[in-house]
Image: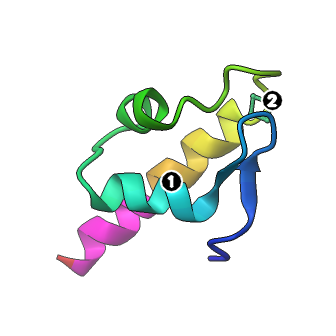
Amino acid sequence: MKREKTACHCKNVTYGMIEDAIKQGAKSYEEVEKQLRFGTGCGKCKEFISFLVKDILDEMKSMV
Ligand code: FES
């Protein structure tokens, strides 16, 4: 995953920021959203980021 890639353009949230939020304890899409406040502009990124969060969570679960 490219950490510097932008996931939410309106709020300038990168893949790396989402990954870090999850590593620091966010356990769901809602928690990541609350921390990073993406999706409050045009809203177009929401669906994509929900898949991204799920992917990262799955990946982390499989590493335990
Ligand atoms: S790209 Fe995320 S709110 Fe517009």
Q: Give the answer, above or below, for where 12 lies relative to 46.
A: below
Could you tell me how far apart the alpha carbons at marks 1 and 2 are, in whole angstroms? 16 Å
Front one among 45 and 5: 5
Disc number for residue 5? none
Q: Residue 20 in the image: x percent, y percent?
A: 41, 61
Give the residue number, with chain letter if any, for mark 1: 18
Would you say residue 42 sits in the magenta stretch? no
CB of residue at label 2: within 8 Å of ligand 1? yes
Question: Quadrant of residue 2 in the image?
Answer: bottom right
Q: Which residue corresponds to the image point at 83% horizontal and 21% vertical from the top-left?
A: 42
**Three-letter code for the amino acid on which mark 2 is drawn:** Lys
Query: Which of 58/42 is in front?
Result: 42
Q: Residues within 10 Å of mark 1 (few under 14, many from 20)?
A: many
Label 1 near ligand 1 (CB < 8 Å): no
Look at the picture and state if 45 lies above or below 55: above
Observer-nearest residue: 9 or 46? 9
Amino acid residing under circle 1: Ile
Identify the mark nearer the N-term, 1 or 2. Answer: 1
Vertical order, 58 against 4 (above or below): above
Mark 2 highlights which residue?
A: 44
- Magenta range is 56-63
Q: Quadrant of the C terminus?
A: bottom left
